[in-house]
Structure formats: C-alpha cells, structure tokens
Amino acid sequence: CGKKEEAAAPAAAPAPEAAAAAEPLKIGFMYVSPVGDGGWTFQHEKARQALQAEFAGKIETSLVESVPEGPDAERVLRDMVGQGNKLVFATSFGYMEPVQKVAAEAKDVKFEHATGYKTADNVRTYDARTYEGAYLAGIIAGGMSKSGQIGVVASVPIPEVLRNINSYVLGAQSVNPKITARVVWVNEWFSPPKESEAATTLINGGADVLYQNTNSPAVLKTAQERGVRAFGKDSDMSAYAPKAHLASAEINWLPYYRKITQDTLAGTWSTGQDWWGVKEGAMDLVSIADDVPQELKDKVAAAKAGLKDGSFHIWKGPLKDNTGKQLLAEGANGDHAFLSGINFYVAGIDGTVPG
Ligand code: GUN
C-alpha cells in the first residue's frame, strides 16, 4: 500500500515544464499620465483591465502611471523587468530611447512601444491611426463652425501629432473648403491648466470648434465654459462637457493587446510595426451629439465605410502645404513613409510648425 502511494507521487507533482507553463505571463503597462486622465492613458487602462479579465489565470498585469518621459522611464522599465514581466507596453512617444536601452539589456522580455518608430529583435512598435478619428471629427467641425475658424490644442511637435492636426483640418475642409485653423502648442502630453489656457487663446482668437492632441478633457471643459464646441479624443469624453461635446475620436486598444498577448503566450511574437485604425476596429468616432445634422452624420459614416474597405484615402493629391508647396500630386496617395514624415501644416492652417 505504501509502495502504491510512492508510485503515485511523481505523477501528482507537475513536471518542471508544466509548472513553468502554468505560471501566468506577467505583463507591465507604463503610462505617462494618471489612469484618471480621462483620455489617452485612461483608454490604455481600460484595455488593460479588459485584457486581464479576458485572460484570467493566464496573465498577470500591472501598471505604473505618471512616469515622465526620460530617465524615470528607464528606471521603471528596469523595475518591471526585475519583477518578472515578460511583456511590457510602454505607452508614450518619449519612451522610445528608454525602451531601446532597457530592451538591449533584457533580451528575454518583449517590449511594445506605442507611437514610436524604433524597433529591435525584442521591440515592436504600434499605434492607433488617430488621424482617421481626427478626420471624422473634422467633417463635423467643418459643418458646425459658424466663424469658419477652428482650432487645435497640440502637444509635442512629432509627425503623429501633425498628422492629427492636418487630418482634422482636411476633414473640415471636405465640408467647407474655406475653413481656416490655428494651433497652440503646449509642449506636454498632460497638463490640464496649460491645455485649458491654450483653448482659451484659440477661442479668444475666434475659433469656435476645438480639437486637441493632449491627454485630458480640459479643452472640452474650457469650450463648454466659453460656449463653443469641441471633441473628445482617445476616449469618450462626452460626460465631461455634454453641452460642448460634438463627438469623441475613440481608440480601442483591446484588439491589439489581445493579439499581442495571444502571440506571446503561443510563442509566436515577433518584432514589427503596426498601425491599427477604423479597419481593425481600433478607431471610431463615437457619441455624436444630437444637434449634429444628419447630413454630417452621413458624411462621417461614408468616410468611415471608405476607411474600412480601403476605398477612401485621407492623404491624396493634389495636396499643398500652407506655403503653397505641393506635397502630393494629383492622383497620388500618401504612403506609410509620407505619413511617418509629416512636418507641415496643410493650406488653411495659420503659422509655422515649431522647429
Ligand atoms: N496621444 C497621442 N500620442 C500620444 C503619446 O505618444 N503619448 C501620450 N501621452 N499621449 C499621446
């Protein structure tokens, strides 16, 4: 009888490989603003929580919020590696160099960097096609602006942000070719007081429909206080200022996070670069206000359908910058290289791109 028990014992204890496989995959998320920013980071956090619920038992996620872009980011990434994370999502542009540095030291960890362009064997980049949401919002802005002048509160002057500004204005001009636009830069991703101040400057200058590329709903709230209209970006911001809110260009990070998690669990993760948009279910214009005319809603729906099936191109010639220089000739479409290098303002935008 005792012998029988001994014989059964090895079968009951899991083999070392099985034990390893049963360990949940540790995934770290690093955020530049607080999870309660109501925009960019909140939306990543929403996806993290959904991911955790979906892969319960298979993954163990954690987060560090309000991590400045720079040396702090490097320290946090090293901590994440030290704590056993094997997959790390670093969710702001300025984490690009810290990710490169730490990834070179931690070859057994996969790094996912949002909005950057530098890869490595264990670094992949990803982004949402936020310019598609900006274009859809622009369609509504073009139809709703009474002054004919719209405005954008911009964060940091990188191609991604310039894509969004230009795309918003192109969307507006598709409805009203006479639309002009102004841009105020705050040089930060998250600073509600500065975002609000920039919105005030734009409103004082005559802009009556605002967009923003910053992380909080401050611009939208300021618009409401001043009796003009604005959009939510990255997450649905309608609840923050329902009177001003026209629509929100919302990102859904979950499909991408799901795919990367599945790939990592299956051992099929590999480096690459992905931009997901309307087509992949990663970008949408949501909570369109009731007073937006049906005609504009129909135009949004048509553009969305065209983005989905690939028949509609936002970046198409003839396209000129605001100095009259031709960017795309008649019949040409902007490709990935063109989009990655955008450093201009299209015709109709006042001013010059910060150097
Ligand atoms: N919004 C769009 N892109 C970014 C980014 O890279 N970082 C932050 N914080 N917000 C963004």
Image: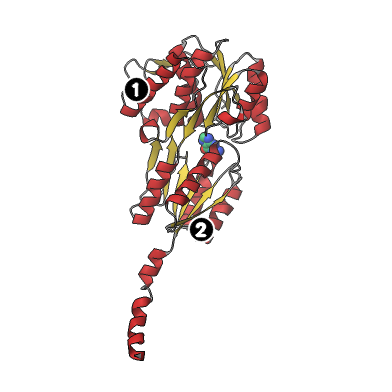
Q: Is residue 273 visible?
A: yes
- The circle drawn on residue 297 is none
Task: Give the labeled residue for mark 2.
Answer: 81
Disc 2 marks a residue whose amino acid type is: Val
- State which quarter of the image contains the N terminus: bottom left
Instruction: Pick whichever, 252 or 135, lies toward us.
Output: 252
Residue ID at (45%, 13%)? 175
List x then y, in percent, for residue 32: 58, 43
Q: Is residue 66 left or right of residue 298?
A: right
Instruction: Pick whichever, 218 or 181, lies toward us.
Output: 218
Q: Is residue 342 visible?
A: no
Instruction: Please say which color scheme the image uses.
Output: secondary structure
Residue ranking furthest to the bottom: 2
List x then y, in percent, for residue 251: 47, 35
List x then y, in percent, for residue 275: 40, 36
Find out whether the residues at labels 2 and 1 contact each other: C-beta distance under 8 Å. Answer: no
List x then y, in percent, for residue 153: 59, 25
